[in-house]
Image (cartoon, rainbow, N blue to C red):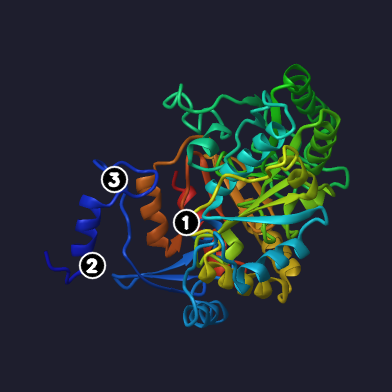
Amino acid sequence: MSYSTPSDFLDYDRDHIWHPYTSMTDPLPVYLVESAHGVRIKLADGRELIDGMSSWWAAIHGYNHPVLNAAIEQQIQSMSHIMFGGFTHKPAVTLAKKLVDMTSESLQHVFFADSGSVAVEVAIKMAIQYWYAQGKKDKQKLLTVRHGYHGDTLGGMSVCDPVNGMHTMFQGVLPQHYFAPAPECYTDDSGNTSSSSSGNTSGNTSGNTSGNISSNIGAVEKLLQTHQSSIAAVIIEPLVQGAGGMRFYCRQYLQALRKLCDEYDVLLILDEIATGFARTGSLFAYEQADIEPDILCVGKALTGGYMTLAAVMTSRKVVAGISADGSGVLMHGPTFMANPLACQVANASIDLLLNSPWKTTVQSIEAQLKKELTACKELACVEAVRVKGAIGVVELKNPVDLKSIQAEFVQQGVWIRPFNKLVYIMPPYIIAAEELTKLTSSIFSVLSRK
């Protein structure tokens, strides 16, 4: 078969390539991309789309950035890849230092992984091995909350929401862990909105939340009391539950959770794969709660969306615990661990972020999202609107028909990828105000016809 037209490529793609979260026999439509630059994606048919997704939240600097391009080009001249077993290289060491310097003082050790899902796998293995090395071999369970998402590998799925994570389909295969109710607090004590999916809207505060915090933390504490001898760690996405429902919650919940982990002597794993690198308004979401994790997972925006790379950071306490039996060997080693190209572009991406006015940039995006998405609250199909940092969410009363709504957004000239009941955007930080308005007005236009 010769490929001379966009339809030729699309036909072969439809017949042979299995895309994420879709059927091979009845696939969702895909669009052939010719190029991407800044916040704009150019399709092979000539249409141009404003990107509202940052390529699943990773391309925070947009596409085809000259600084990131240069980092890749420079590194490939000397070394595109080298095994990390027995070798090291300057891009990896430099990146490790950047990560150590920009995170909590207690996080002093870095393990590089291939992706966010793999980072979660490594974090889980670290937690279990921590207790195993200290003779507490029964501590092999995780405690987490409902509506969470931690990846698509089997270990990651096991701590995802039991419904969204398809636990029933994989019953008997997935490890069994403990689940507490999801956080339901919406507003912190300073009056800042941090709404969950249960009815708060952007820019407004709901009622007193202390009861909700007490209730939900009480459920966590009860599980810790009952199963302390078998729980190795608590894992949670701080402040924002991502692909499990785009739910927001207040920092007091995290503060209470940290105290419980200390009281019941379990590790705290924070999954910042989606929230890290300024997405919520601080470099890392846990900073807003003024706590420190025992293990931290980062990924997605780590390389600015250029290459797949993640990192698991951990404290001296965890390293010492894993080494308590005299071994200390972490039995994990991805083939492409600490790929030099990925590490080098990550270094450039972090520098690009830190040398920019990222805080005011994200604040401006947040303010505009709150102002412009508010109109969606009046639509009959809308259940709630919520905004945190550079994240805007419109929750519908009923699930979307992705095949039809995706086409409607493309017709509007924007790339927005809804799921379930959620229409949301997490745009690149470089987006201009008029481009962001195009995204928000398209959401209102499409939803007004539902």
Disc with the residue nearer the chain's start (1 vs 3): 3
Q: Label 3: which residue?
A: 27
Q: Nearer the viewer, residue 11 or 174?
A: 174
- The mark closer to the camera, 1 or 3, is 1
- The answer to whether residue 75 shows anywhere in this view is yes
Helix, strand or loop for disc 2: helix
Amino acid at dot 1: Thr
Q: Residue sitting at 68 percent across and 74 percent down? A: 351
Which of marks 1 and 2 precedes in the sequence? 2
Crowding at label 2, few (<14), some or many (≥20) Cα neighbours within 10 Å?
A: some
In the image, is residue 389 above or below residue 186? below
Question: In front: 412, or 172?
Answer: 172
Precedes in sequence: disc 3 or disc 2: 2
Q: Quadrant of the N terminus?
A: bottom left
Residue in front for this viewpoint, 308 or 207: 308
Report the quarter where the C terminus lies: top left
Residue 22 coordinates in the image, percent (x, y): 35, 43
Does any portion of residue 433 appear in the rendered image? no
Residue at 24 percent across and 41 percent down: it is: 25
Q: Is residue 300 shown left or right of residue 9? A: right
Measured along the vertical axis of the image, is residue 90 above or below residue 227?
below
Q: Amino acid at mark 2?
A: Pro
Residue named by callout 2 = 6
Compute the Cα span from label 1 to label 3.
Answer: 31 Å
The residue sitting at the left extreme is 1
Q: Label 1, on which residue? A: 335
